[in-house]
Structures are given as C-alpha cells and as structure tokens.
Amino acid sequence: METVVAFTALAVAILIGLGALGVGIGMGLLGGKFLESAARQPEMAPMLQVKMFIVVGLLDAVAMIGVGIALFFTFANPFIGQLQSAVTGG
C-alpha cells in the first residue's frame, strides 16, 4: 500500500509541475507575440489585449484543472480502495 501512495505522490508532483511549466511557456509565448503585434500595429493593441487576456484566462483554467485532479488523487485516491479490495479478496 505504501508503494501506491508513493507513486500517487510522484504522479501528483509531476502533474502539477508539468502543468505549471506548460502554462508558463504558453504565457511567455503569448506575451511575446502580443508585444510584437502591438509594436507592428499600435492601433489594434486594445483589441489584441482583450483577446490576450481571454487566452490567459483559459491557460490558467488548464493549470487549475490540473491542480484539481492532483488534489483529487491526493485526498480521495481511488487506487487505494481498489488495492484494499484486491488484498482482502472482496
């Protein structure tokens, strides 16, 4: 049972870490492209800014969904119940 808990903790750490890494890279690319486009066409900067903030919100939602799944596996681990039923034979 300790192995299942240890692998779950490792999976949670990887899930949160890779989610944060992906969101960080995505926001960096998005911000860079926004600055490039605003420098090329300054009159379109307000419209581009609105769209950029919408996409940033969606990127944050992806990270928060990953955190939610990680917390589910941390506190309501479904694998422990399956392991206990397999060990007890029922």
Image (spheres, grey):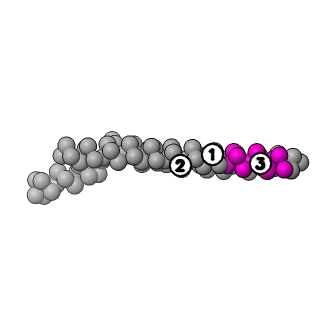
**Residue 73 appears in the rendering:** no
Mark 1 surroundings: few (<14), some (14-19) or many (≥20) residues within 10 A: some
Residue ID for mark 2: 22
Whether residue 39 appears in magenta in the rendering, the answer is yes
Whether residue 80 appears in magenta in the rendering, the answer is no
Horizontal side of residue 25 vs 78, given as left or right: right
Which of the marked residues, 1 or 3, is nearer the chain's N terminus?
1
From the image, state whether disc 3 or disc 2 is nearer to you.
Answer: 3
Circle 1: element type: helix
From the image, state whether disc 1 or disc 3 is nearer to you.
Answer: 3
> Which amino acid type corresponds to the residue marked 1 in the rendered image?
Met
Which of the marked residues, 3 or 2, is nearer the chain's N terminus?
2
Residue 73 x %, y %? 35, 47
Residue ID for mark 1: 27
> Which amino acid type corresponds to the residue marked 3 in the rendered image?
Glu
Horizontal side of residue 50 vs 86, given as left or right: right
Horizontal side of residue 43 vs 85, given as left or right: right
Asked whether the residues under the numbered discs 1 and 3 touch, taking CB atoms below 8 Å apart as contact, a structural biologist would say no
Residue 31 x %, y %? 69, 45
Magenta span: predominant SS is helix
**Magenta span of residues:** 30-40
> Which amino acid type corresponds to the residue marked 2 in the rendered image?
Gly
Closer-to-camera residue (55/89): 55
Residue 89 x %, y %? 10, 58
Taking the spot 63% from the left edge, 45% from the top edge, the residue there is: 28
Q: Distance between the residues labelled 1 and 3?
A: 14 Å
Which of the marked residues, 2 or 1, is nearer the chain's N terminus?
2
Q: How far apart are marks 2 and 1 (CA)?
A: 9 Å
Residue ID for mark 3: 36
State which quadrant residue 67 falls in: top left
